[in-house]
């Protein structure tokens, strides 16, 4: 029966391709495909599918800590023949949406990779200025966003923050200060961040304490390193998502993601949808997590 159905399907596909060669068929077919009705039908189907997917997710184990490498802003802009600034601006707005989706799922820890130490050293000054201005406006918006205060979201920014302009550091201090008393959710932004650099800074801290006699050699272990991470109070990420089709970690939370589940998606960050997030979490739920093997 299965072979018969697949044979019928192939025959219908071949007939459809043959008919589309004729203008009498192809012109109305294109008109229907591009019509408002078709897009409305597709949009409604997507919403129904996404809602059903969410229902499945919430009936299972949702990760406590989700981290995202937000990649693809520039390629998103280039794919639309737009300026790089447009891609970064769209990426900033996308983060607001994703924050809402994460809060809606009740995920208490959410961490994003916004700017690496390598980016600061390699990007053009003009592009960095655009990014810095977006960070300032975004952090100020977060500090005033009623959703942040209603949901009790604590905001923190980690990295080698001394590499950032003073204006960015002021915006960071403001967002952190006005949310410092909250504990329902923790939103962590990695800026001027590098995983290797974080480990180096932690090891330096251990070396200083050992040299001063405060830490003996036998007490130096993984727990001592973990305690000296930038945000040591955070649990390790359960799920790390990377957008834009790249399948690498790019120096992100190297110490913390030793046993994290990884999910890669082809979509550029500004195009990341609610369904994409749900699919990543669903893939996490299907996996049997293993530690040490």
Image (cartoon, helix red, strand yellow):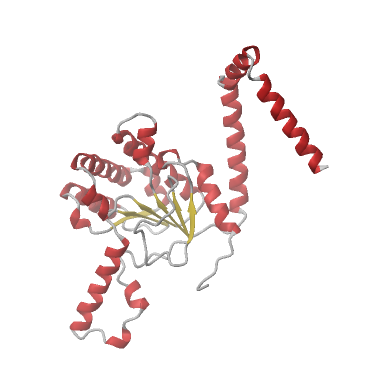
- Residue most extreme to the top: 24
Q: Quadrant of the N terminus?
A: top right
Q: Position of residue 275 (x, y in %)?
A: 54, 43
- Asked if residue 62 lies left or right of residue 9, the reply is left
Q: Position of residue 272 (x, y in %)?
A: 46, 41
Total marks in image: 0
Height in image: 143 above or below 85?
below
- Residue most extreme to the right: 1
Q: Position of residue 289 (x, y in %)?
A: 55, 66
Q: Nearer the viewer, residue 31 or 285?
A: 31
Q: Residue at x 18, y 47 (%)?
A: 167
Height in image: 51 above or below 256?
above
Q: Nearer the viewer, residue 73 or 219?
A: 73
- Asked if residue 264 lies left or right of residue 47, the reply is left
Could you say which quadrant of the image residue 9 lies in? Answer: top right
Q: Residue at x 47, y 67 (%)?
A: 259
Q: Nearer the viewer, residue 29 or 277?
A: 29
Q: Position of residue 187 (x, y in %)?
A: 37, 54
Q: Residue at x 32, y 74 (%)?
A: 225
Could you say which quadrant of the image residue 3 lies in? Answer: top right
Q: Residue at x 64, y 20 (%)?
A: 20
């Amino acid at each position: 029966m299965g072979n018969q159905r697949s044979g019928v399907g192939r025959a219908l596909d071949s007939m459809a391709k043959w008919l589309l060669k004729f203008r009498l068929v192809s012109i109305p077919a294109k008109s229907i495909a591009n019509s408002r009705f078709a897009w409305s039908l597709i949009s409604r189907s997507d919403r129904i599918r996404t809602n059903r997917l969410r229902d499945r997710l919430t009936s299972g184990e949702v990760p406590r800590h989700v981290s995202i490498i937000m990649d693809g802003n520039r390629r998103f802009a280039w794919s639309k023949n737009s300026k790089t600034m447009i891609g970064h601006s769209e990426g900033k707005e996308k983060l607001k949406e994703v924050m809402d989706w994460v809060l809606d799922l009740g995920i208490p820890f959410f961490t994003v990779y916004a700017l690496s130490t390598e980016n600061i050293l390699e990007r053009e000054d003009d592009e960095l200025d655009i990014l810095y201005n977006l960070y300032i406006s975004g952090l100020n918006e977060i500090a005033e966003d009623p959703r942040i205060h209603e949901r009790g979201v604590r905001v923190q920014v980690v990295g080698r923050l001394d590499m950032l302009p003073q204006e960015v550091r002021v915006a960071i201090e403001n967002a952190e200060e006005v949310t410092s008393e909250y504990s329902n959710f923790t939103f962590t932004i990695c800026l001027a961040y590098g995983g290797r650099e974080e480990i180096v800074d932690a090891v330096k801290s251990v070396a200083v304490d050992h040299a001063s006699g405060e830490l003996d050699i036998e007490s130096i272990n993984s727990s001592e390193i973990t305690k000296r991470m930038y945000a040591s109070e955070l649990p390790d990420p359960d799920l790390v998502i990377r957008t834009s089709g790249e399948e690498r970690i790019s120096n992100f939370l190297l110490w913390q993601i030793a046993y994290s589940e990884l999910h890669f998606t082809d979509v550029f960050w500004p195009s990341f949808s609610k369904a994409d997030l749900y699919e990543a979490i669903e893939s996490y739920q299907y996996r049997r997590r293993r530690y040490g093997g």
